[in-house]
Image (cartoon, grey):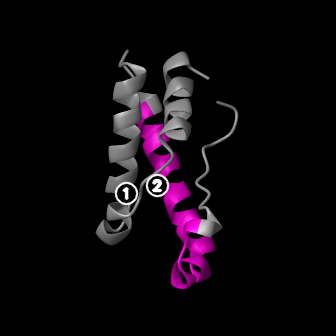
Amino acid sequence: MSEEPQVTLDSHSLNPVEEKLRGPLEEQLTSALQAATDKIRHGYDGESVDEVTEQLLDGTRSGLHPDIAAGFHPDHAQLRRVAEAIVTGH
């Protein structure tokens, strides 16, 4: 994968407080996803795309504050694309 995964929040689904915090929140989510991606990429040992997708979700959540992790519901298709890139070695 030539570029690192990014998390972008849909401003239409955010309440006013979340919208105000959107930039720092996106940075924190992106950082946690990138850390999980790097860890899984380096430890990849033939797991399926579904297994890697689940590892990405778990790994990202474990890198977040528990309150933020509880509200982190990424687009499954986007997370799966990151997993596919790990599995195929891109």
Question: Residue 59, how many percent across, how many down?
Answer: 36, 46
The amino acid beneath tag 2 is Ala
The amino acid beneath tag 1 is Gly
Name the residue carrying label 2.
Answer: 32
State the residue at coordinates (50%, 59%): 29
**Main secondary structure of the magenta stretch:** helix
State the residue at coordinates (56%, 79%): 21
Q: Is residue 61 above or below residue 86?
A: below
| Local SS, label 2 | helix
Q: Earlier in the sequence, mark 2 or mark 1?
A: 2
Q: Does the magenta stretch include residue 88?
A: no
Q: Is residue 21 magenta?
A: yes
Name the residue carrying label 1.
Answer: 63
State the residue at coordinates (35%, 36%): 54
Q: Which mark is residue 76?
A: none
The quarter of the rendered structure image containing the C terminus is top right
Q: Does the residue at mark 2 contact the one at mark 1 (Cβ under 8 Å)?
A: yes
The quarter of the rendered structure image containing the N terminus is top right
State the residue at coordinates (58%, 54%): 7
Crowding at dot 1, Cα within 10 Å, few <14 / some 14-19 / many 20+, comes out as some
Tell which of 25 and 72 is nearer to you: 72
